[in-house]
Image (cartoon, rainbow, N blue to C red):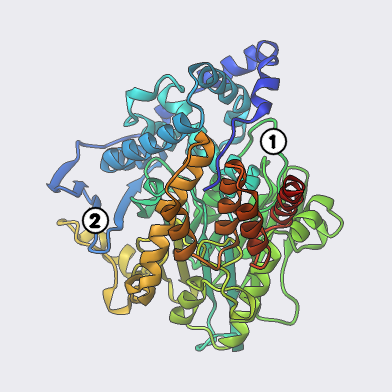
Amino acid sequence: MPQIHFPKIYVLLGFTFLLVSCGVKKSLNDLPNISQYKTDVVQRHQLTDSTFVIGNNFLTKNQQGLYELYVSGNAYELGLKTGSLTRELFQEQEQVFIEKIDDLVPSERKQNMLRKFLAWFNRKMYKHVDEQYKAEIYGISQYASKDYDRIAEPYPRVMYFHGAHDIGHALQDLALVGCSSFAAWGNHTADGKLLIGRNFDFYAGDDFAKNKIIAFVAPDEGHKFMSVTWGGMIGVVSGMNEQGLTVTINAGKSKFPLVAKTPISLVTREILQYASTIDEAIAIAKKREVFVSESIFVGSAKDKKAALIEVSPHNFGVYEVENGNQLVCSNHFQSAAYAKDKKNKKHIFESHSQYRYERMEELLEEAPKVTPASAVRILRNKKGLDDKRIGYGNEKALNQLLAHHGIVFQPEDLKVWVSSNPYQLGEFVTYDLNEVFGTVKNNPEAKPISSPAENIEADPFLHTLAYKHYERYRDLKEQITAALASEEKIESSIVSEFVAVNPDFWEVHFLVGKYYYQNDDYQEALDAFEMAMTKEITTVPDQENLEKYIKKTKRKLK
């Protein structure tokens, strides 16, 4: 993951805090009205080291390492039960998140400024979050760690976390996201039914993705649904409801927002809980104000097709394929509403979004009758266009070897396949929502609720030398980038091994070139930079930066 710098905007906005202190105070003092909710939440009962129950609600860990959560009740109860059952996972996730912030912003002065910025930036979020989701977040926040009150009190802090995903999207230049999604139906699937696949490539470190929760939620109001989530998160990034409606999200290109409104994951949560058709999903999305650009990929069993709802702070569009039965989505907009959008056009030209889009089209053409197994193979594909070897970890690949999860939906059968660690390489675990919601109340021992007979086996790549080399590459990359940051020298054998374990990746040669350049070994640097130029470079800005280094190095050699 690239080094993230403390945004200068924090410094510039620091001078505005005093001007809006009243608005900040209102935000920090806002609390949901929980008196309207009757609660009957007893203390959880522990059955094993990873299994807890509260009545018919439970959390358990399956053999693939995925946590399965079932909760039911009103909004406040859902929060309380989720917080209680997932307490350790929630607090561990929060610790990972805060430690990441501490790593990125080590200065106590800047951390204090960041705390003030978060309060200022999120000062209007409470006005845009539905009361039921405030109540649910408030319930979860009762189980937040007290160790991080320096960031904010538990309730506003958990609310902030729901906007962190959006900020990660806004800061796309930091390569936090690069999601890929596709759908096929009719004569493009083996059985004619709608099939959807997606990789969620939100990367905030390995520890952030370690404890994945497959949540099955039965709210008193709206539809029952499942989603892939993590501790403390009630929003939805990938999910399906009992009506066979699915939602996933793909980032669009955004400016850095100046104020938070509705986190996109809460918009998709509302869609999943209250919509059963594409039109109903569109109506919900239209009434919410967001603060980043996002494609909401919606699949519908009732409509027997998929569509894109493309939202941004100042625009709204819907994209559906005409006279076709295949839909592909990466990280740029496709609807007529964004046809003249300069930022979207620039993003298509400069980023890796269009490349991945074309790669999905290519792979779908090679598998004209898509099945769940072939959809998983597409999600796991590590090569570039025309099967070109582009190096492991290249963001032009559909499988960038950093995904939080991969997922496949079969909405008309209410079936879903969810990947297990590492990345989307582990076994894809099958869940049948008919069975889960039909039998889950008769599960007093909180046994795993998957349908193992239909699981899709782990990627054979896991057992190859190439995978071992990739893991070694990641370790060596940390050493190389640390040496660059500290301007220290390292053993030449480390540099040689770094190239040897991932030779097709342009960035490997670029980092080696930077290391040699920093140490005044300009001929070695030039050789490395020119080798990088022969590889598949990820983005236009990357190529321009590489070309600048080549020019600088040649000048040094004269």
Badge 1: how crowded within 10 Å, few (<14), some, or many (20+)? some
Residue sitting at x 34%, y 34%: 38
Residue 330 showing in the rendered view: no
Instruction: Tell me, for residue 61, which label it has, or none.
Output: 2
Query: Which of the marked residues, 2 or 1, is nearer the chain's N terminus?
Result: 2
Name the residue nearer the viewer: 25 or 509: 509
* Residue 437 seen by the camera: yes
Q: Which mark is residue 244?
A: none
**Mark 1 falls on what kind of element?**
loop
Percent across and percent down for residue 433 are 37, 67
Are dots 2 and 1 in contact, CB under 8 Å? no
Q: Could you say whether the residue bearing mark 2 is in a helix, strand or loop?
A: strand
Instruction: Give the residue furthest to the left.
Output: 47
Q: Determine which residue is flagged by label 1.
A: 257
Image position of 115 with respect to 294: above or below? above
**Quick check: 222 left or right of 23?**
left
Q: Mark 2 and mark 1: span between their CA atoms? A: 38 Å
Above or below residue 374? Residue 125 is: above
